[in-house]
Image (tube, grey):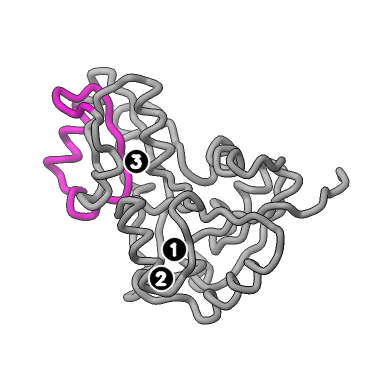
Amino acid sequence: MAARHALKAVLVDLSGTLHIEDTAVPGAQEALQRQGATSVMVRFVTNTTKESKKDLLERLKKLQFDISEDEIFTSLTAARNLVEQKQVRPMLLVDDRALPDFKGIQTSDPNAVVIGLAPDHFHYQILNQAFRLLLDGAPLIAIHKARYYKRQDGLALGPGPFVTALEHATDTKATVVGKPEKTFFLEALRSTGCEPEEAIMIGDDCRDDVGGAQNVGMLGILVKTGIQEHPI
């Protein structure tokens, strides 16, 4: 086993780790304040796709979290970066509140499908439109493939089951940009200038947070504040 380097950076998951919808996890603000007194850099990483980074930041500030926008790295950012690299016109299967993060992206006459968490759009007619685009050769980009997530009223389906349904129906494979993909963690660390061996990941998902971090050489710390309260 390779020797660990001195700790220089911490990646912290948001939904399920620091907050659950509009409620902060007890003690989360105090923990971040204690960490702020150290020299270790912090980045907040999230697969949340149901709101823009601006709305997410406002939510966190209302919950008394002292976080700046440049400390947040989202899977929406990663998806937009890929869309720009591929120079495609996506059909955006995302929550309407997430659309500001795709401002300026051409979406008329789509030739790609981007899918995140979009409960109001996961119905037959819209999914069938995506299905037909994929049959015509459009690439499928999944912002992430989480199976479920924690809400205040209990667990809820994530986008993963819908991504898998489209993959199965069209015999295609989605490009996934969020956790637990290696590129997500490496991009999140890039602004810190740290290597994976100098960082840890804290999150409530043993696969997407901890497992994903471990796959790039980071240490992972699992908290039981979110989805791990209900192991299924």
Query: Disc 1 designates what residue?
Result: 15
Query: Disc 2 designates what residue?
Result: 20
Q: Is residue 127 visible?
A: yes
At which x and y percent is residue 72? 47, 52
Residue at position x 30%, y 35% in the image = 114
Residue farthest to the bottom, as pictured: 26
69 inside magenta stretch: no
Side of 19 where 5 appears, left or right: right
At which x and y percent is residue 6? 81, 52
Side of 129 where 5 appears, left or right: right
Query: Disc 3 designates what residue?
Result: 163
Q: Decide: marks 1, 2 in contact (CB < 8 A)?
A: yes
Secondary structure beneath label 3: helix
Residue at position x 34%, y 49% in the image = 159
**Quick one: label 2 or label 3, which is nearer the N terminus?**
2
- Give the camera-side residue of 82 and 64: 64
Mark 2 Cα shell of 10 Å, populated few (<14), some (14-19), many (≥20): some
**Quick one: label 1 or label 2, which is nearer the N terminus?**
1
Residue at position x 31%, y 45% in the image = 162
Q: Quadrant of residue 221?
A: bottom right
Amino acid type for the residue under numbered disc 1: Ser
Q: Which residues are magenta?
A: 106-132
Q: Is residue 171 visible?
A: no
